[in-house]
């Protein structure tokens, strides 16, 4: 398994497909397969609550992340044969807040 990290993401308060925000060295990561064994999102700075979820994520729908205590979201699957499809993950990062994302493939 290989861990890959991405550039920090500064929020704009708008819903985005997570993979559209992932960059390395300022360059967008282009990939056709976004299946991963593990991924993690951590709020580096937070002035409010951001959310992670499916395409229905909104200000009142999705998993809250980034409370003033700098929340994190790290899904764990008990079966290492299973994978997550990061292309199905959406985020709303509060404007000015910063999120860090990593994945393992």
Image: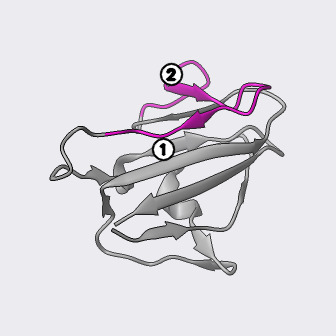
Which secondary structure, mark 2?
loop
Q: Which residue is mark 1?
A: 90
- Say if the magenta span includes residue 78: no
Q: Position of residue 32 (x, y in %)?
A: 31, 74
Image quarter hosting the N terminus: bottom left
Name the dominant secondary structure of the magenta segment: loop
* Residue under the image location 18 percent in, 49 percent down: 82
At which x and y percent is residue 46?
Answer: 80, 36
Q: Dot 1: few (<14), some (14–19), or many (≥20) neighbours within 10 Å?
A: many
- Residue at 30% across / 53% down in the picture? 85
Q: Is residue 88 left or right of residue 68?
A: left
**Magenta part of the chain:** 56-76
User: Please, which residue is most extreme toward the left here?
Assistant: 81
Secondary structure under the numbered disc 1 in the rendered image:
strand
Badge 2: how crowded within 10 Å, few (<14), some, or many (20+)? few
| Disc number placed over residue 61 in the picture, else none | 2
- 99 horizontally vs 80: left or right: right
Mark 1 and mark 2: Cα distance apart in space: 11 Å
Which is more toward the observer, 60 or 22? 22
Q: Quadrant location of the C terminus?
A: bottom left
Q: Is residue 2 visible?
A: yes
């Amino acid at each position: 398994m290989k861990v890959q990290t991405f550039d920090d993401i500064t929020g704009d308060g708008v819903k985005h497909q997570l993979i559209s925000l992932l960059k390395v060295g300022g360059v967008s990561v282009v990939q056709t397969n976004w299946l991963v064994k593990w991924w993690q999102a951590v709020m580096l700075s937070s002035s409010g609550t951001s959310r992670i979820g499916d395409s229905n994520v909104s200000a009142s729908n999705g998993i809250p992340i980034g409370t003033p205590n700098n929340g994190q979201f790290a899904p764990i699957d008990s079966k290492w044969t299973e994978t997550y499809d990061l292309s199905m993950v959406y985020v709303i990062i509060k404007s000015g807040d910063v999120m860090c994302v990593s994945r393992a493939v």
